[in-house]
């Protein structure tokens, strides 16, 4: 009696074999494992990822609006300096001189209105820079990113460039909008153009400062791989460290001199409209020139970013 073996009805089908060429099986490989992804494709990929995050719109939106809001407040304060008429009982000559001095002070303050908000929005830009990379480590998306670029550094560089470009663009647009708002609301005697008193230079230096702070924060996030911890460390560098050195530096001369090279003081020097140095604080060291300060700020950002890149190259994802 013969028995025939039949495959069960629910058996899985045999896997399809790859087509053969000259009797040899064709091997299919992922293009990512076989060839490098072009750098411009990485840039495009990072741009798509950043624009698909809700945090990008929230944080950059706040960073755009915040300087404009502070600029409007400064316009009101500046106009009040010109409109002040409380000189009753003061001799006419002295009153005229005091009003003239107040007007000159108001003009100087008015030229800084476009960049006033940068001191407050810096933390927003830094936080966003941290989120762009630390968020990928938290969600595990970094594995996909590094799979597309096995060498890792092209992916990190692409993300850094996209992030820095977006931060700089938002900063410049925000400051230019603040300038236009100021011209519309300021007293006519306080109007000025972008070419007056190094106004355009201060705007460009403020945008550069924003970009460098964002790159530094990005490097911190690469080192720590933790969103909250990275933001706290950036806050410590920007706000806490200057206070500590300010207290100790009053007794230790070399610490007082070193305070000039802190990111916050470098930012002040970069955004100064003056071509001369000034005291960082009363009886303290002289500030750096704006161009020298920009170079030192670049060193801060490059060193921390390079350390973060080296960490990303060596550590597992």
Image: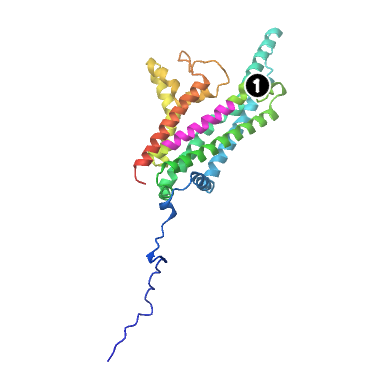
> Residue 190 in magenta?
no
- Magenta-highlighted residues: 202-219
Q: How would you rate the neighbour count of disc 1 (Cα within 10 Å): few for under 14, some for 14-19, many for 20 or more?
A: few
SS for dot 1: helix
State the image coordinates of residue 87 (x, y, percent, origin top left). Answer: 68, 14
**Which residue is found at the position 40% from the left and 24% from the top?**
244
Q: Which residue is mark 1?
A: 196
Q: Which part of the image, by quadrant, shows the N terminus?
A: bottom left
Asked which colour scheme the image uses, the reply is rainbow
Residue 89 appears in the picture as rendered: no
Residue 180 visible here: yes
Q: Nearer the viewer, residue 133 or 234?
A: 133
Name the spot of residue 300 as percent of width and height, x first: 43, 28
Q: Is residue 117 left or right of residue 107?
A: left
Q: Foreground residue, 256 or 251?
A: 256
For image coordinates 69% across by 28% down, the residue present is: 183
Q: Main secondary structure of the magenta part?
A: helix
Residue 213, magenta (yes or no):
yes
**Nearer to the camera, 152 or 72:** 152
């Amino acid at each position: 009696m013969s028995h025939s073996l039949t495959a069960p009805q629910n058996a899985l089908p045999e896997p399809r074999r790859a087509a053969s060429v000259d009797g040899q099986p064709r091997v299919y490989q992922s293009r990512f494992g076989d060839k490098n992804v072009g750098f411009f494709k990485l840039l495009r990929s990072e741009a798509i990822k950043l624009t698909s995050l809700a945090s990008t719109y929230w944080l950059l939106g706040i960073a755009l609006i915040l300087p404009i809001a502070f600029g409007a407040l400064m316009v009101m304060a500046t106009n009040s300096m010109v409109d002040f008429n409380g000189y009753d009982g003061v001799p006419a000559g002295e009153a005229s001189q005091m009003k003239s001095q107040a007007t000159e002070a108001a003009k100087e303050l008015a030229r800084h209105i476009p960049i006033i908000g940068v001191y407050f929005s810096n933390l927003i830009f830094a936080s966003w820079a941290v989120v762009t990379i630390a968020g990928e480590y938290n969600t595990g998306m970094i594995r996909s990113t590094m799979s597309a670029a096995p060498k890792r550094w092209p992916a990190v560089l692409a993300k850094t460039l996209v992030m820095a470009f977006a931060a700089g663009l938002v900063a410049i647009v925000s400051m230019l909008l603040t300038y236009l708002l100021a011209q519309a609301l300021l007293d006519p005697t306080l109007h000025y153009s972008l070419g007056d008193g190094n106004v355009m230079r201060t705007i460009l230096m403020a945008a550069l400062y924003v970009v460098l702070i964002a790159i530094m924060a990005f490097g911190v996030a690469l080192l720590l791989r933790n969103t909250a911890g990275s933001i706290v460390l950036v806050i410590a560098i920007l706000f806490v460290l200057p206070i500590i050195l300010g207290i100790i530096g009053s007794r230790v001369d070399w610490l007082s001199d070193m305070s000039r090279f802190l990111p916050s003081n470098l930012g002040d020097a970069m955004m100064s409209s003056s071509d001369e140095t000034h005291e960082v604080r009363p009886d303290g060291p002289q500030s750096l020139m704006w161009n020298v300060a920009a170079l030192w700020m670049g060193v801060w950002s490059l060193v921390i970013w390079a350390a973060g890149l080296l960490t990303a190259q060596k550590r597992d994802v």
